[in-house]
Amino acid sequence: MKEKQENIFWSLTASNLFDELENEEREQLKRMLMLEENKNNYLRLAKIHNALLHTRNLKSYSKEHSWQRIDRYLKNKNVKYLFNIAKYAAIIVFAFLLGSLFHFWDWQEEEVQYTEVNVPLGQMTDITLSDGSRVWLNSGTTMRYPSNFGKNNRSISLEGEAFFKVKHEKIPFKVKLKNSEVEVLGTAFNVVSFRNEGFSQVTLVNGSVKMNTLNGKEITQIKPSQQITLSNDLKNITLKTVNTVFYKSWTEGKIVFREERMADIIPRLERWYNVDIQYSETEIGELRFSGTVLKNKPFDQIVKAFESLLPIKIDYRYKLENKDVIIISKKNLPMKN
Protein backbone atom coordinates (compact mmCIF):
# COMPACT_ATOMS: atom_id res chain seq x y z
CA MET A 1 0.00 0.00 0.00
CA LYS A 2 2.77 2.38 0.93
CA GLU A 3 4.62 1.66 -2.32
CA LYS A 4 1.45 2.36 -4.29
CA GLN A 5 1.02 5.72 -2.53
CA GLU A 6 4.64 6.61 -3.29
CA ASN A 7 4.15 5.83 -6.97
CA ILE A 8 1.06 8.04 -7.04
CA PHE A 9 3.02 10.83 -5.36
CA TRP A 10 5.90 10.70 -7.88
CA SER A 11 3.48 10.59 -10.79
CA LEU A 12 1.50 13.57 -9.50
CA THR A 13 4.69 15.51 -8.74
CA ALA A 14 6.12 15.04 -12.24
CA SER A 15 2.79 15.95 -13.84
CA ASN A 16 2.44 19.05 -11.71
CA LEU A 17 5.92 20.31 -12.57
CA PHE A 18 4.94 20.14 -16.23
CA ASP A 19 1.55 21.73 -15.53
CA GLU A 20 -0.45 18.66 -16.56
CA LEU A 21 -2.66 18.06 -13.49
CA GLU A 22 -6.44 18.20 -13.42
CA ASN A 23 -8.14 19.97 -10.50
CA GLU A 24 -8.89 16.75 -8.60
CA GLU A 25 -5.30 15.53 -9.02
CA ARG A 26 -3.96 18.89 -7.85
CA GLU A 27 -6.04 18.66 -4.66
CA GLN A 28 -4.80 15.11 -4.10
CA LEU A 29 -1.18 16.30 -4.39
CA LYS A 30 -1.81 19.12 -1.93
CA ARG A 31 -3.05 16.61 0.64
CA MET A 32 0.06 14.47 0.09
CA LEU A 33 2.33 17.50 0.53
CA MET A 34 1.03 17.89 4.08
CA LEU A 35 3.50 15.12 4.97
CA GLU A 36 6.94 16.60 5.69
CA GLU A 37 8.78 13.86 3.75
CA ASN A 38 6.68 14.39 0.63
CA LYS A 39 7.06 18.15 0.89
CA ASN A 40 10.88 17.91 1.09
CA ASN A 41 11.06 15.52 -1.87
CA TYR A 42 8.78 17.77 -3.93
CA LEU A 43 10.96 20.82 -3.24
CA ARG A 44 14.09 18.92 -4.31
CA LEU A 45 12.49 17.86 -7.58
CA ALA A 46 11.16 21.37 -8.23
CA LYS A 47 14.67 22.73 -7.80
CA ILE A 48 16.04 20.20 -10.28
CA HIS A 49 13.24 20.98 -12.73
CA ASN A 50 13.87 24.74 -12.57
CA ALA A 51 17.58 24.22 -13.16
CA LEU A 52 16.82 22.17 -16.25
CA LEU A 53 14.70 24.95 -17.72
CA HIS A 54 17.70 27.29 -17.72
CA THR A 55 20.21 24.93 -19.28
CA ARG A 56 21.63 25.29 -22.79
CA ASN A 57 20.53 23.12 -25.65
CA LEU A 58 22.46 19.98 -26.35
CA LYS A 59 25.03 20.42 -29.11
CA SER A 60 27.25 17.44 -29.65
CA TYR A 61 25.84 15.19 -26.90
CA SER A 62 23.83 12.11 -27.71
CA LYS A 63 21.34 10.40 -25.40
CA GLU A 64 23.50 7.30 -25.26
CA HIS A 65 26.61 9.28 -24.35
CA SER A 66 24.76 11.27 -21.67
CA TRP A 67 23.24 8.18 -20.06
CA GLN A 68 26.71 6.62 -19.95
CA ARG A 69 27.93 9.70 -18.10
CA ILE A 70 24.99 9.41 -15.66
CA ASP A 71 25.74 5.73 -15.08
CA ARG A 72 29.42 6.40 -14.33
CA TYR A 73 28.44 9.23 -12.00
CA LEU A 74 26.07 7.05 -10.00
CA LYS A 75 28.55 4.18 -9.73
CA ASN A 76 31.27 6.47 -8.38
CA LYS A 77 29.01 8.23 -5.89
CA ASN A 78 29.57 7.05 -2.30
CA VAL A 79 26.65 8.77 -0.61
CA LYS A 80 23.20 7.35 0.01
CA TYR A 81 20.46 8.94 -2.03
CA LEU A 82 17.39 10.09 -0.17
CA PHE A 83 15.21 8.66 -2.89
CA ASN A 84 15.60 6.38 -5.85
CA ILE A 85 16.78 8.01 -9.09
CA ALA A 86 14.15 6.01 -10.94
CA LYS A 87 11.43 7.93 -9.20
CA TYR A 88 12.26 11.12 -11.09
CA ALA A 89 13.34 9.42 -14.30
CA ALA A 90 10.31 10.93 -15.99
CA ILE A 91 11.73 14.41 -15.41
CA ILE A 92 15.10 13.40 -16.84
CA VAL A 93 13.40 11.95 -19.92
CA PHE A 94 11.58 15.21 -20.41
CA ALA A 95 14.89 17.02 -20.04
CA PHE A 96 16.34 15.03 -22.92
CA LEU A 97 13.31 15.79 -25.02
CA LEU A 98 13.86 19.46 -24.28
CA GLY A 99 17.48 19.07 -25.35
CA SER A 100 18.95 20.29 -22.07
CA LEU A 101 22.02 19.53 -19.97
CA PHE A 102 22.00 18.61 -16.31
CA HIS A 103 23.11 21.64 -14.30
CA PHE A 104 22.34 19.91 -11.04
CA TRP A 105 25.39 17.75 -11.73
CA ASP A 106 27.29 20.76 -13.08
CA TRP A 107 27.61 19.29 -16.55
CA GLN A 108 28.29 22.30 -18.70
CA GLU A 109 30.96 20.61 -20.74
CA GLU A 110 30.60 20.79 -24.50
CA GLU A 111 32.75 19.30 -27.18
CA VAL A 112 35.29 21.89 -28.27
CA GLN A 113 36.42 21.69 -31.85
CA TYR A 114 39.53 23.33 -33.23
CA THR A 115 40.38 25.27 -36.35
CA GLU A 116 43.86 24.75 -37.72
CA VAL A 117 45.44 27.02 -40.30
CA ASN A 118 48.48 25.66 -42.16
CA VAL A 119 50.52 27.94 -44.42
CA PRO A 120 52.69 26.05 -46.94
CA LEU A 121 56.28 27.02 -47.60
CA GLY A 122 56.53 29.81 -50.13
CA GLN A 123 53.20 31.36 -49.10
CA MET A 124 51.74 33.63 -46.42
CA THR A 125 48.24 34.58 -45.31
CA ASP A 126 46.38 36.78 -42.87
CA ILE A 127 43.12 36.21 -41.00
CA THR A 128 40.86 38.21 -38.69
CA LEU A 129 39.75 36.34 -35.58
CA SER A 130 36.26 36.54 -34.09
CA ASP A 131 37.37 39.10 -31.48
CA GLY A 132 38.62 41.48 -34.19
CA SER A 133 42.31 40.67 -33.73
CA ARG A 134 44.31 40.29 -36.94
CA VAL A 135 47.04 37.71 -37.52
CA TRP A 136 49.55 37.43 -40.37
CA LEU A 137 51.00 33.93 -40.79
CA ASN A 138 54.32 33.49 -42.55
CA SER A 139 55.50 30.54 -44.64
CA GLY A 140 55.64 27.14 -42.93
CA THR A 141 53.42 28.26 -40.04
CA THR A 142 50.58 26.45 -38.24
CA MET A 143 48.06 28.18 -35.98
CA ARG A 144 45.36 26.37 -33.97
CA TYR A 145 42.48 27.86 -31.97
CA PRO A 146 39.25 26.54 -30.38
CA SER A 147 35.72 27.00 -31.69
CA ASN A 148 34.78 28.97 -28.55
CA PHE A 149 37.60 31.48 -29.10
CA GLY A 150 36.55 34.94 -27.97
CA LYS A 151 33.76 33.76 -25.66
CA ASN A 152 35.48 32.71 -22.46
CA ASN A 153 39.06 32.61 -23.69
CA ARG A 154 41.36 34.01 -26.35
CA SER A 155 44.00 31.30 -26.49
CA ILE A 156 45.72 29.98 -29.59
CA SER A 157 48.75 27.79 -30.25
CA LEU A 158 51.41 28.64 -32.81
CA GLU A 159 54.23 26.91 -34.56
CA GLY A 160 56.15 29.10 -37.00
CA GLU A 161 56.13 32.86 -37.46
CA ALA A 162 53.23 35.25 -37.03
CA PHE A 163 52.58 38.94 -36.53
CA PHE A 164 49.69 39.89 -34.25
CA LYS A 165 47.59 43.02 -33.92
CA VAL A 166 45.49 42.15 -30.89
CA LYS A 167 42.25 43.97 -30.18
CA HIS A 168 42.07 45.19 -26.59
CA GLU A 169 39.65 43.16 -24.46
CA LYS A 170 39.28 42.25 -20.79
CA ILE A 171 39.97 38.61 -21.64
CA PRO A 172 43.75 38.09 -22.03
CA PHE A 173 44.99 37.05 -25.47
CA LYS A 174 47.40 34.12 -25.11
CA VAL A 175 49.73 32.57 -27.68
CA LYS A 176 51.10 29.18 -26.67
CA LEU A 177 54.51 28.37 -28.12
CA LYS A 178 56.58 25.19 -27.82
CA ASN A 179 58.27 26.35 -24.62
CA SER A 180 56.39 29.38 -23.32
CA GLU A 181 53.28 31.53 -23.55
CA VAL A 182 52.74 35.12 -24.65
CA GLU A 183 50.00 36.96 -22.72
CA VAL A 184 48.62 40.36 -23.75
CA LEU A 185 45.42 42.41 -23.60
CA GLY A 186 45.92 44.49 -26.72
CA THR A 187 49.15 45.10 -28.62
CA ALA A 188 51.20 44.37 -31.76
CA PHE A 189 54.05 41.86 -31.75
CA ASN A 190 55.92 39.32 -33.85
CA VAL A 191 56.53 35.70 -32.83
CA VAL A 192 59.03 33.21 -34.22
CA SER A 193 58.83 29.67 -32.84
CA PHE A 194 59.62 26.88 -35.30
CA ARG A 195 59.75 23.29 -34.07
CA ASN A 196 63.12 22.52 -35.66
CA GLU A 197 64.84 25.56 -34.16
CA GLY A 198 66.28 25.70 -30.66
CA PHE A 199 64.58 28.93 -29.58
CA SER A 200 61.44 31.04 -29.54
CA GLN A 201 61.52 34.79 -30.12
CA VAL A 202 59.02 37.56 -29.42
CA THR A 203 59.47 41.13 -30.69
CA LEU A 204 57.17 43.82 -29.30
CA VAL A 205 56.14 46.72 -31.57
CA ASN A 206 53.76 48.49 -29.20
CA GLY A 207 51.78 47.81 -26.05
CA SER A 208 52.92 45.43 -23.34
CA VAL A 209 53.66 41.69 -23.36
CA LYS A 210 54.06 39.25 -20.50
CA MET A 211 56.03 36.06 -21.06
CA ASN A 212 54.93 33.02 -19.06
CA THR A 213 55.89 29.39 -18.78
CA LEU A 214 53.38 26.94 -20.21
CA ASN A 215 51.91 26.43 -16.72
CA GLY A 216 51.24 30.17 -16.34
CA LYS A 217 54.23 31.25 -14.22
CA GLU A 218 55.49 34.69 -15.23
CA ILE A 219 58.98 34.86 -16.74
CA THR A 220 59.22 38.58 -17.49
CA GLN A 221 57.52 41.51 -19.20
CA ILE A 222 58.86 43.28 -22.28
CA LYS A 223 58.42 46.83 -23.55
CA PRO A 224 58.03 48.25 -27.07
CA SER A 225 61.09 47.71 -29.34
CA GLN A 226 62.34 44.97 -27.04
CA GLN A 227 62.95 41.42 -28.23
CA ILE A 228 63.14 38.36 -26.01
CA THR A 229 64.76 35.11 -27.12
CA LEU A 230 64.18 31.96 -25.10
CA SER A 231 65.98 28.65 -25.52
CA ASN A 232 63.75 25.59 -25.68
CA ASP A 233 64.70 24.59 -22.12
CA LEU A 234 64.21 28.20 -20.90
CA LYS A 235 67.70 28.16 -19.39
CA ASN A 236 69.00 30.85 -21.73
CA ILE A 237 66.89 34.00 -21.99
CA THR A 238 68.14 37.21 -23.60
CA LEU A 239 66.45 40.60 -23.89
CA LYS A 240 67.58 43.35 -26.26
CA THR A 241 66.37 46.44 -28.11
CA VAL A 242 65.85 46.05 -31.87
CA ASN A 243 64.53 47.94 -34.87
CA THR A 244 61.04 46.52 -35.24
CA VAL A 245 60.80 47.38 -38.97
CA PHE A 246 62.59 44.14 -39.82
CA TYR A 247 60.03 42.09 -37.87
CA LYS A 248 56.81 43.63 -39.20
CA SER A 249 57.71 44.54 -42.80
CA TRP A 250 57.08 40.97 -44.04
CA THR A 251 53.34 41.45 -43.44
CA GLU A 252 53.45 43.98 -46.29
CA GLY A 253 55.06 41.49 -48.66
CA LYS A 254 58.63 42.61 -48.09
CA ILE A 255 61.50 42.20 -45.67
CA VAL A 256 63.67 45.15 -44.78
CA PHE A 257 67.16 43.95 -43.83
CA ARG A 258 69.39 46.32 -41.89
CA GLU A 259 72.86 44.91 -41.33
CA GLU A 260 71.43 41.44 -40.77
CA ARG A 261 73.67 38.36 -40.74
CA MET A 262 73.33 36.04 -43.72
CA ALA A 263 73.02 33.16 -41.24
CA ASP A 264 69.81 34.80 -39.96
CA ILE A 265 68.53 35.84 -43.41
CA ILE A 266 68.90 32.47 -45.13
CA PRO A 267 66.39 30.46 -43.01
CA ARG A 268 63.77 33.14 -43.64
CA LEU A 269 64.37 33.08 -47.39
CA GLU A 270 64.20 29.28 -47.43
CA ARG A 271 60.75 29.29 -45.83
CA TRP A 272 59.48 32.26 -47.78
CA TYR A 273 60.48 30.97 -51.22
CA ASN A 274 60.47 27.22 -50.47
CA VAL A 275 64.07 26.72 -51.60
CA ASP A 276 67.14 24.99 -50.19
CA ILE A 277 70.07 27.39 -49.62
CA GLN A 278 73.47 25.91 -48.88
CA TYR A 279 76.87 27.40 -48.05
CA SER A 280 80.04 25.79 -46.78
CA GLU A 281 82.26 28.64 -45.62
CA THR A 282 81.36 29.93 -42.15
CA GLU A 283 82.47 33.41 -43.19
CA ILE A 284 79.45 33.62 -45.51
CA GLY A 285 77.08 33.27 -42.58
CA GLU A 286 78.72 36.23 -40.85
CA LEU A 287 78.36 38.57 -43.83
CA ARG A 288 75.84 41.35 -43.24
CA PHE A 289 73.27 42.59 -45.71
CA SER A 290 71.12 45.73 -45.91
CA GLY A 291 68.29 46.07 -48.39
CA THR A 292 64.64 45.26 -49.12
CA VAL A 293 63.42 41.95 -50.49
CA LEU A 294 60.02 41.98 -52.25
CA LYS A 295 58.05 38.76 -52.11
CA ASN A 296 56.39 39.24 -55.50
CA LYS A 297 59.75 39.29 -57.26
CA PRO A 298 61.19 36.04 -58.72
CA PHE A 299 63.71 34.55 -56.34
CA ASP A 300 66.42 34.38 -58.97
CA GLN A 301 66.28 38.19 -59.06
CA ILE A 302 66.59 38.31 -55.30
CA VAL A 303 69.75 36.23 -55.23
CA LYS A 304 71.29 38.43 -57.92
CA ALA A 305 70.91 41.36 -55.55
CA PHE A 306 72.82 39.48 -52.88
CA GLU A 307 75.47 38.51 -55.40
CA SER A 308 75.95 42.11 -56.55
CA LEU A 309 76.17 43.57 -53.04
CA LEU A 310 78.18 40.90 -51.24
CA PRO A 311 81.48 39.11 -52.06
CA ILE A 312 79.66 35.87 -52.86
CA LYS A 313 78.90 33.73 -55.89
CA ILE A 314 75.54 32.02 -56.28
CA ASP A 315 74.78 28.88 -58.26
CA TYR A 316 71.03 28.47 -58.81
CA ARG A 317 70.00 24.90 -59.58
CA TYR A 318 66.42 24.33 -60.73
CA LYS A 319 64.66 21.13 -59.63
CA LEU A 320 61.47 19.89 -61.28
CA GLU A 321 60.12 17.72 -58.46
CA ASN A 322 62.02 19.03 -55.43
CA LYS A 323 63.01 22.38 -54.01
CA ASP A 324 65.34 24.51 -56.08
CA VAL A 325 68.85 24.50 -54.61
CA ILE A 326 70.98 27.62 -54.20
CA ILE A 327 74.70 27.12 -53.56
CA ILE A 328 76.49 30.13 -52.05
CA SER A 329 80.27 30.30 -52.16
CA LYS A 330 82.91 32.97 -51.67
CA LYS A 331 83.66 35.07 -54.71
CA ASN A 332 87.21 34.81 -55.95
CA LEU A 333 88.46 38.41 -55.83
CA PRO A 334 91.20 39.48 -58.26
CA MET A 335 94.63 39.51 -56.68
CA LYS A 336 96.32 42.84 -56.23
CA ASN A 337 99.73 43.43 -57.82
Image (tube, helix red, strand yellow):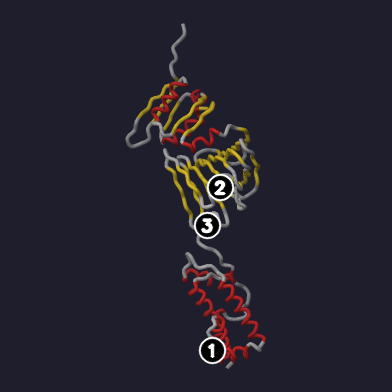
Three-letter code for the amino acid on which mark 3 is drawn: Asn
Determine contact: label 2, label 1, CB under 8 Å: no
Q: Is residue 59 above or below residue 172?
A: below
Three-letter code for the amino acid on which mark 1 is drawn: Glu
For mark 2, what is the residue?
176
Of badges 1 and 3, the one in the foreground is 1
In this view, the residue farthest toward the right is 36
User: What numbered label is drawn on residue 22?
Assistant: 1
Determine contact: label 3, label 2, CB under 8 Å: no
The local secondary structure at tag 2 comes to strand
Q: Is residue 308 above or below residue 144?
A: above
In this view, the residue farthest toward the bottom is 1
User: What numbered label is drawn on residue 148?
Assistant: 3
Percent coordinates x, y for residue 216 in the rendering: 63, 49
- Counting labels gives 3
The local secondary structure at tag 3 comes to loop
Q: Earlier in the sequence, mark 3 or mark 2?
A: 3
Asked which quadrant contains residue 44, the reply is: bottom right
